[in-house]
Image (cartoon, rainbow, N blue to C red):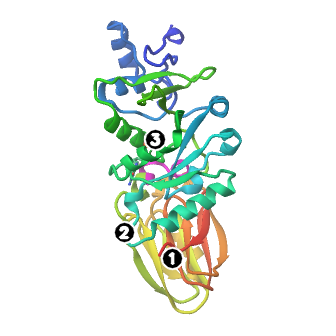
Amino acid sequence: NQEELRCIGCGAVIQSTDPEKAGYTPQSAIKKGMANDELYCQRCFRLRHYNEIAPVSLSDDDFLRLLSQIRDTKALIVYVVDIFDLNGSLIPGLHRFVGDNPVLLVGNKEDILPRSLHRTRLTDWMRQQVNQAGIRPIATTLVSAKKNHQIEHLLDLIEKYRQNRDVYVVGVTNVGKSTLINQIIALRTGVKDLITTSRFPGTTLDKIEIPLDDGHQLIDTPGIIHEHQMAHVLPAKDLKLVSPQKELKPKTYQLDDSQTIFLGGLGRFDYLNGPHAGFVAYFDNNLKLHRTKLANADHFYQKHLGDLLTPPSKDELDKIPALKRYEFTTEHKSDLVFEGLGWITVPAKVTVAGWAPDGVSVLLRRAMI
Ligand code: GDP
């Protein structure tokens, strides 16, 4: 009876139905594990054998229980966000669970930002956005987990602010938290130093505990699913295609008003009102941009969605929510941000509209130039 089986690493009930959930183990691995009397869930198996951490998602109940435990603990909270999907990275209601604990805000995927852009503008913006969500970070920093940039600096900040406390690393799925934790493990522990896994009491979730020098721990919490995230609006293969992987190469467009640029089939930019001017687009090179006349844009979209305007492909049209329109008039030079996709830098004193799949935010921030 499979209900009874538990992972000997983390104690999660073994299941082979949902790879995203705790305790997932493929059927073949269950057989093998039982034969060897060493049954680990896939997550713990990978951790043991490859020192690699896979994300799991959690139900709302488990998540709330986990967060309330953090509130009742004296800890430093390391809050990891994706700088390309900041709104999609925010953990709803986190401020209620922080209590008096300090929060260190970490913007990941810094390697994708062109060198010419001001980092402080970006960290200012990150701080503003989380302030609006009721969180006041004691410090804000940028890293690239993938490229191993600034991870040592992050560890220094953690040491500086944790002051004899445990450290909880929190983040929604897809912000790169696993990649970051794996880098920290690689930097901090030799193969000999076994990372321990244990349960969050009262939940079905396991946590990873990385020992720190003074007997305290750095605790990796499971990734949290955020519905309003490009990652959950797009089919996985499209997400791969349009998520920026390399440093963005800006493209400049000279536009007159009443012109439109399509971002594949996933977004749309309308220049509504203002003089002839330059607009700079920052998107992954795989996202094909198409310029057309505003007057013709609706028709063009209907006609070409899935062929010229792709992703989505023809067979995925029903999987993508309809585009929703947001209109802005700029005071200063600004970035019109399509969360999870990229942004377009627009001049001061113009009126523009941005469209994105319903659920994905479009917003204006001070230009990073
Ligand atoms: P998690 O769900 O938060 O644990 O995220 P993962 O660690 O699985 O990473 C999600 C995606 O973001 C993967 O495609 C990673 O390759 C990518 N990623 C993670 N860190 C970075 C980074 O520093 N830079 C870039 N460009 N991509 C990253």
Measure the alpha-carbon separation of dots 3 and 2: 28 Å
Specify whether residue 237 is painted magenta: yes
Please name the residue shown 35% across and 41% down the image.
Answer: 183
Mark 3 belongs to which amino acid?
A: Glu
x, y percentage for residue 126?
Answer: 56, 59
Q: Which mark is residue 345?
A: 1
Please name the residue shown 37% across and 9% down the image.
Answer: 34
Is residue 359 at least partly visible in the picture? no
Horizontal relation, residue 74 to residue 1: left or right: right
Please name the residue shown 45% across and 70% down the image.
Answer: 118
Q: Quadrant of residue 171?
A: top right
Closer to the chain start, of discs 2 and 1, is: 2
x, y percentage for residue 80?
Answer: 51, 47
Disc 3 marks which residue? Answer: 159
Dot 1: element? strand
Mark 2 belongs to which amino acid?
A: Arg
Disc 2 marks which residue? Answer: 115
Mark 1 belongs to which amino acid?
A: Thr
